[in-house]
C-alpha cells in the first residue's frame, strides 16, 4: 500500500476571542509585553483564547475521499486552512504529499469588473495553473460552466449561481494530488451540483485524494468512503461514512430539546415495539413495528385525530399517516381525558437514520393541536444488499441465460427467493 | 514527488529549549536556509499569478476610466508642472534666469518619484483589499504588493518614454557614457520601492492606521526629497542630511549622470555661497544600494515569516 497523500497527526490550533490590537497606538504596549516575556507560550491558552482544532488526526490515501462533517464552528474550515497553509497549527504536524489545491470559496479569486474570460485566467493563476495549462483547458472550462454566451461579460453582471459555476469549472480542471473542497456546491442548482459531484468522483478515480467538507450529508455519503465528525474542534467519530453520518444525524436530533407537551396536550407515552419486542429503535429493512401513542388533553380538543410522521435525515417527509385517514373518526376529548392510538407498520426503509414524529390534529389539514417531529430517532440497518430510497422487499424469482435465437433452450441457473 | 511538511512547531520549540546552544543555533540556521529556499521557489512558482494580477490592475485602470492611457502621464505631468511653477517663482524672486537644464533635471527626477509615490500608495492597502484571497487561498502573499509595483512600473515606462523624448529633442541633452549609470539606478529605485511596499503592506495589515500615515508622508515627502530643488541649496550639512533619505541619492545620481554628465564614481563638490558642499559622493550611492538590497532581504524575509498569521490578524 502506498503512503497516505495527507497525514495529520495531533493537530491543535487556537484562536482568540474578541479583537486583536489593530492600530499603531496598541503596538507599543504589545511590544513591551513581548519584551518582558509575559505572554503565554505558543501552544498554551491565554485569556480569551480557545482551541478551534483540538488534537485531530487522520490520513487520506491517494484516490480516497474523506468527508468532514460537523455543526457550524466545529473547526472544519480551520482544519482545511491549516492543510492549505493559510493558517499555521500551534501543535502537531501534518504532511501533504504532492501538489495540493484548495477550493475554499469558489468565487474568492474573482474580480467583478473583469470579464468571465479574464477571470478564468486570473482564478486559474490564483489556484496555481500555468498559462499554457489554462489555454489548453479553456474550452472545457467554459463548456463545463455552461455560461458560454456570457464569457465576455463582466462578472459583476453574473448571478451568484453563475459565478459559482464559473469558479467551480476552473477548479474542476485542476490536476492536483490532493484536493480540498469546502462547501462550495451550495449555490449551484441541483443539476450542476450533480455534475460537480460526478466530476469529483472522476478526479478521485485518477488517484487524487479529496477532502470534502459539506453540510450536504447526501453528497458526503455518495462521494466519500471515509468520514470524520468534528465537534468543538475535536474528533468525535472517524470511519466508514455511513456509520459516521448516522451517528452525526442521531446526535443532531438528540441534541435539540424536543418538548413533548404544549398548552393543548401532553404526550404521555410513545412506545415502539419491533420483532425483538421491547422499546425498540433499531430495525432491519422490512421489519414489522408497532407504534403506540397516548396523549393527555389539557383542554377540550374537538375533532382530534393522531398522526405519525417519519422524516429522513435531510428532514424530508418519508411517511405520514393518521387515524382519520386510516378509518377512525375524529374524537372529541375533554380536558384531562386521554387519547390513545396504535399503528402497525412495515419498516420498508433503506439503511439510515429516520425520525419518528407525533401530531394531534383537529381535522385533516386544519388546526394542529400538537406537532413534534424527531421525537424518537430510528436506526434502520440493511438486511440485504438492496439500495435506493425505499425497501420494496424484492425477491428474485428467475435468473437464467437465454440462448441465441434458433439454438436449443436450456435453463442455466435459477435463483431461489431469499 | 514534492513533499510539503507542515510547520513542525513541536520539533522547532524542542530545539530551542535544548540546553546545547550549538545545536539550537545550527537548527535555527537550518530553518532560515529552508525559509529562504521556500521564499524563492514559491515566488518563482507564482510568476504566472504575479503577471495576472498586474494585468488585472492594468486593465482595471484603463477600463471604465475617463483618462484611459493618459493616466500614465497624468502624475508626472502634474509634478513637473508644479515643479516648473516653483522653479519659475524662485527664479523671478532671486532675479536669476531659469536654465533649461534645471527644468530637465526636475522632469527627470519627478518621474521616479511619481513611480515611488504611486507604488507605495497602491501597495500599502494591497493585502487588505485582497482580503478574500488572503483568508481563502494560499499563495505567496508577496505577489500582492509586488504586482502593484509592477503595475506602476508599466505606467512609469510610458511616462519614461515621453520624458526621454522631451529630454533629447527639446532640452537637447547630449548622449554621454555616464548614461550607462541609468539602468543601475533604475534597478535600485525599483528594489527600494519593493522594500517599502513589502514593509508598509505588511504593517498596514496589522495596524490599519499605517495607510493614513503613509498618505501624509507621501504628500509631504516631496519636500524632503530633492525633486524640485538641488540638495546643495541646503548647505554642507543640510545636503548630507537630505542624502539620508534613501531615495535622494538615487534621484540625484540620475540627474547628475544624465543631465550633467558626471561620472558617479567621483565625488562632486559645489561652491554654494562661499561654502564647499559635497553634492555627490559614491558613498551616497552605496548607502542607497544597501537599503535597496540588504533592506529588501530583511523586508522580504520577515514579510514571508509573518505570512502564516496574516489570515488570522487581517
Image (tube, helix red, strand yellow):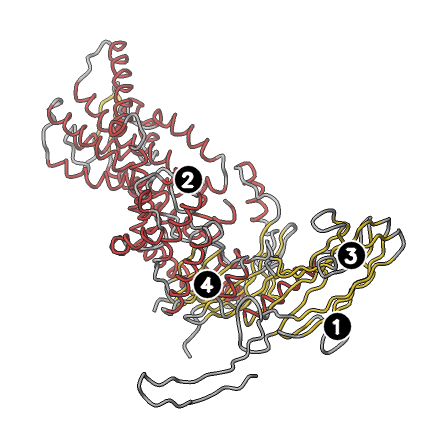
Q: Position of residue B87 (x, y in %)?
A: 26, 16
Q: Which label's residue is closer to the chain start, 1 or 3?
A: 1
Name the residue beneath numbered marker 1. Answer: A273
> Alpha carbon of mark 1 to alpha carbon of mark 4: how far?
53 Å
Which dot, 4 or 2, sits closer to the camera? 4
Left or right for A38, reference B95? right
For the residue carrying disc 2, how many other residues have a C-alpha within 10 Å: few (<14), some (14-19), or many (20+)? many
User: Residue A329 bears which disc, if any?
Assistant: 3
- Residue A335 against residue A203 in the figure, above or below: above
Q: Position of residue B311 (x, y in %)?
A: 48, 49
> Alpha carbon of mark 3 to alpha carbon of mark 2: how far?
79 Å
> Alpha carbon of mark 2 to alpha carbon of mark 1: how far?
71 Å
Name the residue beneath numbered marker 4. Answer: B6
> Alpha carbon of mark 4 to alpha carbon of mark 2: how far?
28 Å
Choose between B146 and A299: the one closer to the eye.
A299
Evaluate whether label 4 is on the same chain as label 2.
Answer: yes
Secondary element type, mark 1: strand
User: Residue B200 bears which disc, if any?
Assistant: 2
Secondary element type, mark 4: loop
Instruction: Report if the CB atoms under discs 4 and 2 are less than 8 Å apart.
Output: no
Q: Which label's residue is closer to the chain start, 4 or 2?
A: 4
Image-quadrant location for residue B239: top left
- Residue B150 against residue B43 in the figure, above or below: above
Subunit of mark 1? Answer: A
Amino acid at each position: 500500500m502506498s503512503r497516505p497523500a495527507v497525514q495529520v497527526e495531533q493537530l491543535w490550533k487556537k484562536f482568540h476571542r474578541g479583537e486583536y490590537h489593530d492600530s499603531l497606538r496598541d503596538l507599543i504596549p504589545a511590544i513591551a509585553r513581548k519584551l518582558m516575556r509575559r505572554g503565554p507560550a505558543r501552544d498554551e491558552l491565554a485569556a480569551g483564547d480557545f482551541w478551534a482544532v483540538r488534537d485531530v488526526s487522520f490520513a487520506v490515501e491517494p484516490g480516497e475521499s474523506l468527508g468532514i462533517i460537523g455543526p457550524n464552528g466545529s473547526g472544519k474550515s480551520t482544519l482545511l486552512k491549516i492543510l492549505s497553509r493559510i493558517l499555521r497549527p500551534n501543535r502537531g504536524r501534518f504532511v501533504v504529499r504532492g501538489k495540493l489545491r484548495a477550493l475554499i470559496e469558489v468565487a474568492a479569486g474573482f474580480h467583478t469588473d473583469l470579464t468571465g474570460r479574464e477571470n478564468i485566467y486570473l482564478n486559474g493563476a490564483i489556484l496555481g495553473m500555468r498559462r499554457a495549462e489554462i489555454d489548453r483547458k479553456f474550452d472545457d472550462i467554459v463548456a463545463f460552466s455552461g455560461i458560454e454566451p456570457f464569457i465576455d461579460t463582466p462578472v459583476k453582471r453574473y448571478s451568484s449561481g453563475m459565478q459559482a459555476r464559473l469558479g467551480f469549472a476552473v477548479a474542476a480542471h485542476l490536476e492536483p494530488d490532493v484536493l480540498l473542497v469546502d462547501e462550495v456546491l451550495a449555490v449551484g442548482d441541483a443539476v450542476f451540483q450533480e455534475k460537480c459531484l460526478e466530476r469529483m468522483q472522476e478526479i478521485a478515480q485518477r488517484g487524487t485524494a479529496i477532502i470534502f467538507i459539506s453540510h450536504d450529508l447526501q453528497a458526503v455519503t455518495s462521494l466519500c468512503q471515509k468520514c470524520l465528525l468534528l465537534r468543538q474542534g475535536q474528533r468525535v467519530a472517524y470511519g466508514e461514512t455511513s456509520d459516521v453520518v448516522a451517528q452525526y444525524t442521531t446526535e443532531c436530533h438528540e441534541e435539540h430539546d424536543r418538548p413533548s407537551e404544549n398548552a393543548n396536550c401532553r404526550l404521555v407515552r410513545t412506545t415502539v415495539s419491533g420483532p425483538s419486542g421491547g422499546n425498540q429503535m433499531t430495525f432491519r429493512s422490512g421489519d414489522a413495528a408497532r407504534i403506540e401513542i397516548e396523549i393527555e388533553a389539557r383542554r377540550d380538543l374537538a375533532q382530534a385525530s393522531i398522526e405519525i410522521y417519519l422524516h429522513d435525515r435531510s428532514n424530508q417527509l418519508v411517511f405520514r399517516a393518521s387515524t382519520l385517514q386510516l378509518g377512525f373518526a375524529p374524537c372529541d376529548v375533554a380536558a384531562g381525558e386521554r387519547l390513545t392510538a396504535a399503528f402497525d407498520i412495515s419498516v420498508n426503509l433503506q439503511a439510515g437514520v429516520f425520525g419518528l414524529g407525533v401530531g394531534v390534529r383537529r381535522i385533516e389539514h386544519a388546526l394542529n393541536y400538537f406537532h413534534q417531529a424527531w421525537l424518537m430517532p430510528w436506526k434502520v440497518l440493511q438486511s440485504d444488499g438492496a439500495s435506493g430510497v425505499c425497501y420494496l422487499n424484492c425477491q428474485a424469482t428467475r435468473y437464467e441465460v437465454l440462448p441465441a435465437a434458433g439454438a436449443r433452450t436450456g435453463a442455466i441457473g435459477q435463483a431461489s427467493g431469499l | 514527488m514534492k513533499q510539503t511538511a507542515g510547520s513542525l512547531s513541536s520539533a522547532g520549540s524542542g530545539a530551542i529549549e535544548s540546553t546545547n546552544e550549538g545545536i539550537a543555533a545550527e537548527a535555527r540556521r537550518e530553518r532560515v536556509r529552508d525559509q529562504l529556499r521556500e521564499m524563492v521557489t514559491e515566488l518563482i512558482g507564482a510568476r504566472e499569478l504575479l503577471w495576472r494580477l498586474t494585468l488585472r490592475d492594468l486593465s482595471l485602470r484603463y477600463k471604465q476610466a475617463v483618462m484611459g492611457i493618459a493616466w500614465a502621464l497624468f502624475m508626472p505631468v502634474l509634478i513637473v508642472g508644479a515643479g516648473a511653477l516653483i522653479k519659475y517663482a524662485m527664479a523671478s524672486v532671486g532675479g536669476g534666469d531659469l536654465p533649461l537644464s534645471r527644468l530637465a533635471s526636475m522632469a527627470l527626477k519627478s518621474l521616479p518619484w511619481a513611480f515611488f509615490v504611486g507604488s507605495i500608495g497602491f501597495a500599502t492597502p494591497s493585502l487588505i483589499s485582497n482580503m478574500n484571497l488572503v483568508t481563502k487561498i494560499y499563495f505567496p502573499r508577496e505577489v500582492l504588493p509586488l504586482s502593484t509595483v509592477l503595475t506602476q512600473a508599466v505606467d512609469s515606462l510610458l511616462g519614461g518614454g515621453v520624458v526621454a523624448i522631451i529630454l533629447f529633442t527639446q532640452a537637447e541633452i547630449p548622449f554621454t557614457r555616464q548614461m550607462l549609470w541609468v539602468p543601475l539606478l533604475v534597478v535600485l529605485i525599483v528594489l527600494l520601492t519593493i522594500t517599502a511596499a513589502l514593509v508598509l503592506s505588511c504593517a498596514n495589515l496589522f495596524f490599519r492606521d499605517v495607510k493614513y500615515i503613509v498618505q501624509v508622508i507621501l504628500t509631504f515627502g516631496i519636500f524632503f526629497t530633492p525633486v524640485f530643488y538641488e540638495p546643495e541649496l541646503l548647505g554642507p550639512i543640510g545636503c548630507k542630511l537630505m542624502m539620508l533619505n534613501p531615495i535622494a541619492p538615487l534621484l540625484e545620481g540620475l540627474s547628475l549622470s544624465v543631465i550633467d554628465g558626471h561620472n558617479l564614481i567621483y565625488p562632486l563638490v559645489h561652491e554654494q555661497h562661499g561654502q564647499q558642499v559635497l553634492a555627490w559622493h559614491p558613498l551616497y550611492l552605496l548607502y542607497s544600494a544597501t537599503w535597496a538590497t540588504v533592506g529588501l532581504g530583511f523586508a522580504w524575509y520577515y514579510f514571508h515569516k509573518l505570512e502564516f498569521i496574516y489570515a488570522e490578524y487581517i
